[in-house]
């Protein structure tokens, strides 16, 4: 069988989205190398298990050896204290790009987040040129990853597609998700488009399904060829009945980042 990718590395393979993508990505590569600091289970045919912590420079260097492309989901994926975010999402992403440069990896799909721009209001529509307005330390760390990958593209030609993932859940669960929802099938379509588009350069794509309500405009990423097929619309009536019209003054519903805008363990000096 002719696979588009020989050896693909999936980091964060034991996490929520890692577990969704593990069987799906296997269909598109000859060998799927899986990494996480957490338990990865047993290897299926064509899988390689390589546990590693992102902040461990030597382990990450070894992890990237012989890899053709990377889907980088690893790291802290919600708001947290600064130290774990710094270790995994700042030092860890630097280690990953350095190892990619060292081993000549040409393309990385980086799981960024909608929380890079979480402080835009829900009545605004933004595209990838809108300046970051992170809503959390987590969002700041993802903005760092986006900028770091830009530098590695300009200096070393490593192509990256930054996926500003919305809410990738089995179905939309809140009114906000009418705009932010990304179905698991569309997540697979998005990752696959980012891995296989002939030329991506350095791109930022908002990870959403073909939803009726939009916070984000993906026209600047048309060259990636992502075509979502799902939509949150079938859940609209149910969600609108369950959640009353949000108060525009309520800080938890005013911004695109939703409740993230008030999360935060800012007790560093307490
Ligand atoms: C994210 O970045 C988180 O990883 C995920 O847990 C969700 O909270 C999502 O954003 C969201 O905004 O719904």
Image: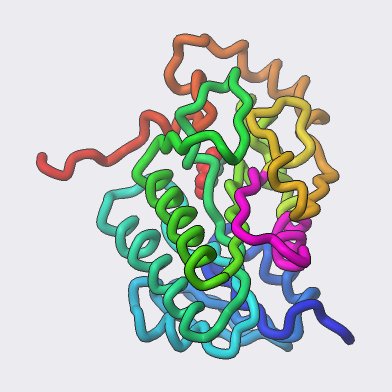
Residue in the picture at 46% in, 61% down: 151
- Would you place residue 69 above or below residue 12 in this image? below
- Would you place residue 105 above or below residue 24 in this image? below
Q: Where does residue 128 sit, x and y in percent of width and height?
A: 59, 40
Q: Is residue 67 left or right of residue 132?
A: right
Residue in the picture at 28% in, 49% down: 81
Residue in the picture at 42% in, 44% down: 139
Q: Where does residue 63 sit, x and y in percent of width and height?
A: 49, 84
Is 211 inside the magenta-drawn segment? no
Indicate the quadrant where residue 59 lies. bottom left
Location of the N terminus by quadrant is bottom right
- Would you place residue 193 above or below residue 229 in this image? below
Q: Where does residue 95 sit, x and y in percent of width and height?
A: 39, 73
Q: In the orientation shown, which residue stands out farthest toward the front? A: 155
Q: Is residue 14 visible?
A: no
Indicate the quadrant where residue 38 lies. bottom left
Q: Where does residue 25 sit, x and y in percent of width and height?
A: 73, 70
Is 200 inside the magenta-drawn segment? yes
Indicate the quadrant where residue 57 lies. bottom left
Magenta stretch bounds: 188-207
Location of the C terminus by quadrant is top left
**How are the residues colored?**
rainbow
Looking at the picture, tell me which residue is in the foreground, 62 or 34.
Answer: 62
Looking at the picture, tell me which residue is in the foreground, 181 or 256.
Answer: 256
Q: In the orientation shown, which residue stands out farthest toward the right? A: 1
Q: In the orientation shown, which residue stands out farthest toward the left? A: 270
Residue in the picture at 38% in, 45% down: 140
Q: In the rendered picture of this protein, how many numbered marks are placed on residues?
A: 0
Q: Is residue 224 visible?
A: yes
Looking at the picture, tell me which residue is in the foreground, 37 or 25.
Answer: 25
């Amino acid at each position: 069988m002719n696979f588009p990718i020989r050896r693909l590395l999936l980091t964060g393979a034991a996490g929520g989205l890692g577990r969704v993508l593990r069987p799906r990505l296997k269909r598109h590569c000859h060998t799927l190398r899986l990494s996480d600091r957490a338990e990865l289970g047993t290897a299926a045919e064509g899988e390689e298990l390589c546990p590693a912590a992102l902040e461990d420079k030597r382990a990450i260097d070894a992890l990237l050896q012989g890899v053709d492309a990377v889907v980088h989901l690893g790291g802290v994926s919600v708001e947290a204290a600064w130290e774990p975010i710094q270790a995994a999402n700042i030092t860890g992403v630097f280690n990953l790009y350095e190892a990619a440069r060292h081993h000549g990896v040409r393309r990385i799909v980086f799981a960024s987040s909608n929380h890079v721009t979480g402080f835009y209001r829900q009545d605004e529509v933004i595209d990838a040129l809108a300046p970051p307005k992170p809503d959390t330390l987590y969002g700041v760390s993802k903005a760092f990853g986006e900028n770091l990958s830009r530098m590695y593209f300009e200096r070393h030609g490593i192509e990256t597609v930054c996926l500003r993932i919305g809410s990738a859940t089995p179905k939309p669960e809140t009114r906000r998700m009418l705009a932010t929802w990304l179905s698991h099938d569309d997540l697979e379509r998005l990752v696959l488009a980012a891995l296989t588009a002939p030329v991506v350069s350095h791109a930022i794509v908002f990870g959403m399904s073909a939803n009726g309500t939009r916070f984000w405009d993906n026209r600047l990423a048309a060259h990636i060829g992502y075509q979502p097929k799902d939509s949150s619309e079938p859940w609209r009536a149910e969600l609108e009945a369950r959640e009353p019209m949000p108060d525009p003054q309520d800080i938890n519903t005013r911004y695109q980042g939703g409740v993230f805008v008030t999360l935060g363990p800012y007790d560093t000096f307490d």
